Each structure stands twice: as C-alpha cells, then as structure tokens.
Amino acid sequence: MPVDRLLPTDESRDLLALVRQIAAEQLTPRAADDEAASRFPRDVFGLLGRAGLLSLPYPEEFGGGDQPYEVYLQVLEEIASAWMSVAVGTGVHALSCWAIAGFGSHEQRKALLPDMLGGEQLGAYCLSEPQAGSDVAAMSTRAVRDGDHYVLTGTKAWITHGGEADFYLVFARTGDDRTRGISAFHVPAGSAGMDFGAPERKMGLTGSTTTQVLFDGCRVPAGHLIGAEGQGMHIALAALDSGRLAIAAAATGLAQAALDAAAAYAVGREQFGKPISDFQGMQFLLADMAAAVEQSRATYLYAAKRRDAGLAYSRQASIAKLTATDAAMRVTTDAVQVLGGSGYTRDYPVERYMREAKITQIFEGTNQVQRMVIGRDVVRAARG
C-alpha cells in the first residue's frame, strides 16, 4: 500500500509518483526472477539514470536533480520496497560520485560529473579490504607516485558493482600516517592492472554483484587524485554519514514491503472460520511491525532534515542506520512468521526480504560500530 508521505513541494510529490510508477511497472515484476538467477540488472540503472533518479541529491550545476536529502531518501525507500538490490546500488552510485562533487577540482567536475550523474556511467566505492573493514585506517592498498601517475597495489573487498561499474572511487595509502596517509582516486573501468575476484556467493542481494577489486601495478593519472594527498580519510568519512542514511532508507523500504505482504496475507488467510487478521494476537504482531517501520522512517527523516539544514548529523545518521536496519531484520522475520510455512518458501517474497535484511545490519559500518559512534558522542556531550 502507498506510504502516506509528508513531502515539501509539489515537485517532490510528482517525483515520488514517478518513482512509484517505475517501481510498479519496471522493478517489482522482475525482481524475484533476477534475484533467483543472480542476474545484475544493469539496464535498470540506465532506466533510473534517464529518469534523473541517479543524480537527485546533487546540485543542478553539476547535472544533478538538486533535491534535498529528505526527498532523495524517500525515493530510495520507494525503490527498496520494490527491489532492494537496485536501491542499494543506487545508493552506492551516489556515494561513488560524492568525492568528485564535494572535493574534486573544477576540471574534474566538468569532465567527469555529467556522465557520472546522467546515468551513462555506474560507480563503485572501494574502501573496505580483507583486513580493513570497520577499521578503515588499517587499509594496506598503496598508491605510489611515479611521474605523472600513481601506481596502485592492493586488494579491496566487498565491492558492490565490482566488475560491473564504469568507474571506481578508490581509497589507498599514500603515506604511513594511520589517518592522514590515505588519499582518494578516480579509477576508470578497464584501467591496466585492475582485475576482479569471483562474485561473492551471498545469502541475499543476489542481483547485486559483489567482488574483490584487485590492483597489481595499476597506473592512474595523477590528475585523478581527488582533493589533496592525505585527504582521503576525511572524504571517506564524510561520505559514509550520507551512505548510512541511504541504507537506513532502503532498510525502511524493505521493512515496509514485508509489512505490506504480511498484512495482505493475514487479511486473505482464513483459519477457524475467519481471517487470521481478526485475531488479536495477529493484530498485535502487525501493530509492532508497523510501529517499527514508522520509527525507522522518522529517524532517517530527522537526520536528513539536519543534513539539509547544514547541521551536524553524524550521530543521527548512526541512530537512523542502527534503528532502521535492526527493525528491518525484526519486521522481515515477523513477516515470515505471519505467513507460516508459506513464508518459508520462495513462492512468497518475504523469505527473500528476510535474507536481504541481514546485510543491512553489517555494511556501511556494523550496528556494533554504530553503537560505538553513538555512545562516544553521548559521553562527549556529557563531558562538555
């Protein structure tokens, strides 16, 4: 059922109506089959790009949609309610464009952003490594200056769109300082010395390709350094706050889809001569699911409003990510329970929703890391 949203403008209302139409006509009908076949829907990202949905949070001067984050995240939520892999991919693409838009030179923006934001290209975000996940500063991939190029060597892990993307935002070590020795690079697909591992065999999001990205003497023009040497950690962490909000919005959309499926099943399923939705125990379960979904939506929208207002929102982004993804795991699990044995089969989408929900508690910083971020900020504020 459509979510009753409070949107700031007529333009944003029209935008959400367009997204719902695309989701109903182009995403929902094929999501289950493509996920079952582990088929990457590259054509869908082209469709979203042509509709202007891959550039929404970026300024018009860069070719973006100039929409507030409050609106962009609700677009992501609608996409996720139809197809979670596509929503995650849309968020990853936006994250991959962030460094050039926010820290790139005028020449880099002019040369690269039109295709990056226009849907002609798809991006990937290369931060994590086999031994550097939540501990970003432990990364070992290196970039060594050699004349007019940097030479990259190392391995990035868990990269969404690995082998499918047209460009890669890569973070690599250019110095030995743990936090100030990391830099950011724009690396086009097809660069010599860049290769990919086999796609990961995942529990969920099987329509989203995830691989290692391997650099073995990959030569990148020095003009593809983003910002200054040593600025990479700042760029990465600034982008991650926005990325956490994207995951919160997508998790909320996934939970909404699970709630909708459970409620529809409960109304149609009869036991003991009446719909199971008439039983108080079932109504209480659905009520808890609905409350969790709306709590999730409220937390990410509050963080987004702070971002749009230019206020600090790192703590609120972590709260939104923690709240929404824990809720998604709980709501999708409860949806399977509502459907009973049917929920455990692939004849209904809720078993897929449950599998997809689990990863939201892990990527963009595990929920244990989010609790550390929130707790430290609470203590910092208490100390003044």
Image (tube, rainbow, N blue to C red):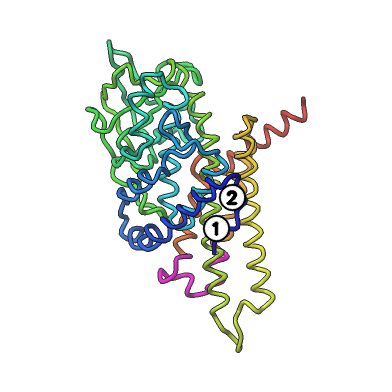
Judging from the image, what secondary structure is the residue with disc 2 in?
A: helix
> Dot 2 surroundings within 10 Å: few (below 14), some, or many (20 or more)?
many
Judging from the image, what secondary structure is the residue with disc 1 in?
A: helix
Residue 375 position within the rendered picture, expressed as x and y whole percent measured from the top left: 68, 36
State the residue position of label 1.
255
- Kindly identify the amino acid type of the residue bearing the numbered disc 1: Ala
Pointer 1 or 2: first along the chain: 1
Q: Confirm or deny contact between disc 1 and disc 2 (CB under 8 A).
A: yes
Residue 336 position within the rendered picture, expressed as x and y whole percent measured from the top left: 52, 67
Dividing the picture into quadrants, the one containing residue 227 is: top left
Q: Is residue 347 above or below residue 360?
A: below
**In 3D space, how far apart are the residues under numbered discs 1 and 2 (Cα atoms)?**
9 Å
Residue at 44% x, 49% y: name it: 87
Q: Is residue 170 above or below residue 327?
A: above
Residue 66 position within the rendered picture, expressed as x and y whole percent measured from the top left: 49, 35
Question: Main SS of the magenta segment?
Answer: helix
Q: Which residues are magenta?
A: 333-350
> Dot 1 surroundings within 10 Å: few (below 14), some, or many (20 or more)?
many
- Kindly identify the amino acid type of the residue bearing the numbered disc 2: Ala
Dividing the picture into quadrants, the one containing residue 123 is: top left
Image quarter in which the N terminus is found: bottom right
Quick one: 246 or 26, which is closer to the camera? 26
Q: Is residue 161 covered in magenta?
A: no
Residue at 60% x, 53% y: name it: 5
Q: Is residue 62 left or right of residue 364?
A: left
State the residue position of label 2.
324
Residue positioned most to the bottom: 273
